[in-house]
Image (cartoon, coloured by chain):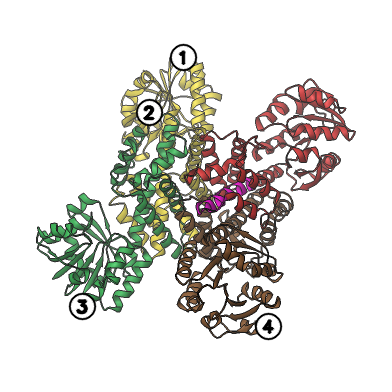
Chain colours: A green, B yellow, C red, D brown
Amino acid sequence: MQVAFLGLGTMGAPMAANLAKAGVALRVWNRSEGPAARLAEVGAEPAASPAEAAHGADVLIAMLADDAATKAVLLDGGALEALAPGALLVNMATVAVAFGASLADQAERCGVAYVAAPVLGRVNVAEAGELNILAGGRADAIDRAQPLFDVMGRKTWRFGERPEQANAVKLAVNFMLASAIETMGEAASLAEGHGVSGADFLAMATSTVFAAPAYQGYGAAIASGTFEPAGFKLSLGLKDVRLALEAAEAARTPMLFAAVLRDNLIDGVAHGEGDLDWAALAKVAARRAGRL
Amino acid sequence: MQVAFLGLGTMGAPMAANLAKAGVALRVWNRSEGPAARLAEVGAEPAASPAEAAHGADVLIAMLADDAATKAVLLDGGALEALAPGALLVNMATVAVAFGASLADQAERCGVAYVAAPVLGRVNVAEAGELNILAGGRADAIDRAQPLFDVMGRKTWRFGERPEQANAVKLAVNFMLASAIETMGEAASLAEGHGVSGADFLAMATSTVFAAPAYQGYGAAIASGTFEPAGFKLSLGLKDVRLALEAAEAARTPMLFAAVLRDNLIDGVAHGEGDLDWAALAKVAARRAGRL
Amino acid sequence: MQVAFLGLGTMGAPMAANLAKAGVALRVWNRSEGPAARLAEVGAEPAASPAEAAHGADVLIAMLADDAATKAVLLDGGALEALAPGALLVNMATVAVAFGASLADQAERCGVAYVAAPVLGRVNVAEAGELNILAGGRADAIDRAQPLFDVMGRKTWRFGERPEQANAVKLAVNFMLASAIETMGEAASLAEGHGVSGADFLAMATSTVFAAPAYQGYGAAIASGTFEPAGFKLSLGLKDVRLALEAAEAARTPMLFAAVLRDNLIDGVAHGEGDLDWAALAKVAARRAGRL
Amino acid sequence: MQVAFLGLGTMGAPMAANLAKAGVALRVWNRSEGPAARLAEVGAEPAASPAEAAHGADVLIAMLADDAATKAVLLDGGALEALAPGALLVNMATVAVAFGASLADQAERCGVAYVAAPVLGRVNVAEAGELNILAGGRADAIDRAQPLFDVMGRKTWRFGERPEQANAVKLAVNFMLASAIETMGEAASLAEGHGVSGADFLAMATSTVFAAPAYQGYGAAIASGTFEPAGFKLSLGLKDVRLALEAAEAARTPMLFAAVLRDNLIDGVAHGEGDLDWAALAKVAARRAGRL
């Protein structure tokens, strides 16, 4: 099975490396050249263009920055058309539900099977091949991708026959993360308003009823006020919450927490915090209370 | 050490039972008689009134339903005045910060030491003596209560010299719980809006990044639509969120998530859901999306 | 008809003066002495205490600062008890609905008829005797007060047999005013975000579809950034919005705009703007956009 | 001066008719044929296509349904390209700020002057030639359009040199209208929660401090529960609020009222109220209070 992998960024590079190390025949491409060269060291074959990478591939995996980059590379860049009919396209990036649906349409028009498979987990999880993979698409298509998913992730969760359903799930999870950050920011702000150390408060909450990875990681960042370097930029968080709201509107679903999050994330961007980690959402809460 | 325990409700009964079983000399009182009689079976001595229970006690523990009950029993009922100067009052109920502060004033006037010590954990945790105890008050006062806390809980967290600081912390935690419920409700509603099973979605989220007790318990209730019997009534959740908002206003702290929660909890009460478990907040999200 | 008037503040003084000038036999009292002395110049008789003013009066009008002052003067201060059975109490202050209801109970216990009659209009309107009077109470009781209302106001609106219904109406109007301010603040902030003068924008909006007194007055304040002296303090606005939310919760009515207003007013107070006119709510919008 | 007018819908038809009646040489086009035929009766010349209408025109006025229709007719349909360099394009529809900016770019590329001039006022106002016209663009370009604006409107307000600034202003006004509706809905709901007739309450509010056209019109609709036929559909209101939020995000401006409005409008659409007048936003408030 010949696999093409497009997009060797923070997440894509370790994911592709794990495939190469597992012996998968891999052609890779990235907008800038360095990452592809590094992948060559573990056995991948650099390609000069998306289309060249895709040509003759059985499976094309895309892990590009956002909707625009995905569109530019897969559609405008000719990668999708370079696939043979019957090939499989797997998009693992976090994209809009509407864009995911249009990608599904385009793939069908080209006779290409299509699976959306965004992932949960940060770089270290990707390196360890322990990602949670959120898959949407026809069962037979996901089955074809499963051996590759098993290399990159610890578990694949299947959410529906339409690929974009996985995009909705991923956006819902990212909304939940933003919501957890905001919740900790407000709660810590309340505690501090009464003279309690926010750090002490968060240490207690995240080691008892909120002893979950999401709360512990972001809780520690908030407690220590460490928002750089950004694991996930606040401006990207704003983008994902906006995509969640768009997906919600398309499904006629009110989501007031998401609406508040969008508003507070814009407050953060307006105060020059767009490049900080989105845990800095807690700064908005503190600022509004006059404590920054 | 003679200990009086007032309030043998769902939580108070197992907490007092653990003290009695540990050999603490215990006088107990409850508004209705049954619970005190049951406590007698494990060695506690029923008292005819709050004041009788308090008379001559070194430590008075109160675990009453709410601010009104606490005021009725401790202040109007004469329990506080029945304590000898130098005795210790420990209030373990969830009460308003402002009420907690006024209780501290009254205790000081009576020459009684005072500790606020609300708890985290439901009945089964109380039975196992594994509560997390959130303590506020002077260090020497908490030290005196510590042996009793060690019987009832697995860990005591100290948050400040003013007792009411512990009340603020407890309200902040309850806010976080409500927020987690709302977050799951909205996220599941988004997923269902795109044809994904909300139960499948929550199963994934609460076994990965949100693998915390709070998310798993409430997530399961939401996924299965099981809101009865109520572990914690939605109407009581509304009360606690209101108390959190009052505490926030006193500390000049905006808390928009809490404001939204209050609004949605009122929506629930308006639709006859006040006696359901507050996980039913997820029903409000579904109803607003026209899916109930 | 002998009338007692308690509370000669910014609003009470001109209202009482109009009654005195119209030939009403008037005994007046105020916490500080100056205002009563000035009323004497137009024919009113200063009283040494609330009870002295009330003694023998057919009608007692109260226009005190807030719930606490009203309680202190009417109940604790003995004014209500000093009224003869069959007398009429008219409370024209803006108070909580729950407090209004308890006042009605107390009046009934004393055999005193009771009308709640908060007013719309600022000082200049009060001086001109052009207030809008929002009346609640039994029709026969309001009928008795009507001649006095006709002196102080241009129109009396009747809203129900229970006096506190008028309190609910008054709080609903104040909520609408706060809402109009917030709306202009956000809209002007949007305009300015695109390089349009907020003042130009508000001048247009408030002379076309929003050509109402409320919009024009507050719009001009926002456009010119003039928030001092305060016509109505932001901290009092926060109090009234809180009372509206409490009244809403008692009636199981979600009010999300009110919840947002409360939050933003707290933001203002946290930034030291509590003594500014509540039009300064627009500053919160500008600050959140990073433009202050 | 030869004028082309594209889009003869509810608003466009009377606007074009006024121009024709004023003696302006007018070529008109509409997607369906009826309206153009009716315009011919007052002297306008029907054109077979947008491009034919535009060919040789000095001024092209577009009043199309939305962004998509405007793009389809002006850009894809060739109308813009059919204008001679130096001609003037006037877009009077309510469109997104970002789309307005891109239209400005396209016009510049074609050597065509461009003015955005959305309007305030409904059909009857358009018929009377009494619209308020919100103009953005270079002063000399607006000057060229001014004689036409004077026929269609009572006043032209100029907001900036960049045409899309007028689009931002129009969206800000529509946000204010939605906000007024929501405010009345919540206030009336509070009043009704206390047994006060919402209609009585709104009659009072909109004839006193809120005596503005916007409040009176929508207030009467809410009071009588008359949401059909729709003067402006709730689903279109949702679109405009969304466009306001997008414009706000582009300008890094938090707008929480707008966020709440979007959420409640989605609630309305989810309950099948998208085709009602957007005054039906008040139904959402009543429904949430359990009173529908």
Image quarter (top left, top right, bottom left or bottom right) of the N terminus of chain B: top left
The residue mark sitting in front, 4 or 1, is 4
Whether labels 4 and 1 belong to a single chain: the reply is no
In the drawing, what numbered circle is on residue A84? 3
Q: Which residue matches tag 1?
A: B84
Left or right: B15 in relation to B240: left
Residue B188, relative to residue D3: is it above or below?
above
Q: Are marks 4 and 2 in contact (CB under 8 Å)?
A: no
Residue A122, relative to residue B131: is it above or below?
below
Q: Chain of mark 4?
A: D
Splitting the image into 4 quarters, where does residue A69 fall? bottom left
Name the residue rendered at 83%, 32% in the picture. C17
In the drawing, what numbered circle is on residue B159? 2
Q: Nearer the viewer, residue B221 or C265?
A: C265
Q: How many marks?
A: 4
| CA separation in Å, label 4 and label 1 | 100 Å
| CA separation in Å, label 3 and label 2 | 64 Å
Q: Amino acid at mark 4?
A: Gly
| CA separation in Å, label 4 and label 2 | 82 Å
Q: Considering the numbered disc 4 on the image, is that residue within a helix, a strand or a loop?
A: loop
| CA separation in Å, label 1 and label 2 | 27 Å
The residue mark sitting in front, 4 or 2, is 4
Whether labels 3 and 2 belong to a single chain: the reply is no
> 10 Å neighbourhood of mark 2: few (<14), some, or many (≥20)?
many
Q: Nearer the viewer, residue D154 or C216?
A: D154
Q: Amino acid at mark 3?
A: Ala
